[in-house]
Amino acid sequence: MNLLEKFREYINQQNLFQSKDKLLLAVSGGVDSVVLCELCNQAGYDFAIAHCNFQLRGQESERDENFVNELGKKYGVEVLVKKFDTEKYATENKLSIQVAARELRYTWFKELLAKVKKDSNSEIPDAQFLIPNWLLTAHHANDNMETLLMNLFKGTGINGLHGILPKQRNIIRPLLFAKKEELTEFALANNLSFVEDSSNASDKYTRNY
């Protein structure tokens, strides 16, 4: 069974969404989210793309944003981009950069998932894109194992031992069945371009360490 077949099967087995639902894909430009885009395209799902520019890596952050915009053109789908002053938010709220980025990201995603209409009172500019039923992220099996380890080291309770759930409210992780190596192999086999986040090589962040 190839990755596309496994993808479809996992969605059906977990009852994640219906084939006619409108999807919003969280896309960084890395291999995981690029593969998610390609799988959704090959499966014939209706989707738009959301990209967060946390402005933490200078020109590299701008490169990622430009790459995702080009990805939207490739698939002929709407791309929504939000720039954040992450360092300022982290300082003002006394948060680590990673926690600040997570809060900013999911707050914006919740806004996009709201049933907005384009009008003068909308806080989301150009909100004429498809109104999504679900937000999809590209978390995979390796991410799940990392989360379990992190929770274990933190002394989590029973709730933390389940790791990442495939579906939480209207957020879906349809790649939890796949290992990182499978996603990379799929990207290479399908000649998919993607960008590398240099911060992933740093061990100053708990998950990387």
Image (cartoon, rainbow, N blue to C red):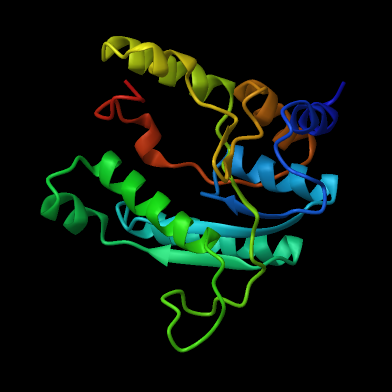
Instruction: Name which residue lies at 75% across and 53% down.
Output: 21
Say left or right for 185 vs 68: right
Position of residue 85 relative to residue 28, above or below, is below
Say left or right for 192 vs 90: right
Q: Nearer the viewer, residue 8 or 157?
A: 157
**Quarter of the C terminus within the rendering:** top left
Position of residue 19 relative to residue 173, above or below, is below
Q: Nearer the viewer, residue 111 or 67?
A: 111
Residue 33 position in % (x across, y down) = 60, 43
Residue 204 position in % (x across, y down) = 24, 28
Say left or right for 55 vs 173: left
Instruction: Name which residue lies at 82% across and 28% down.
Output: 9
Q: Nearer the viewer, residue 100 or 207?
A: 100
Instruction: Name which residue lies at 69% across and 67% down.
Output: 73
Position of residue 33 relative to residue 205, above or below, is below
Q: Quadrant of residue 13?
A: top right
Instruction: Name which residue lies at 32% across and 58% down.
Output: 55
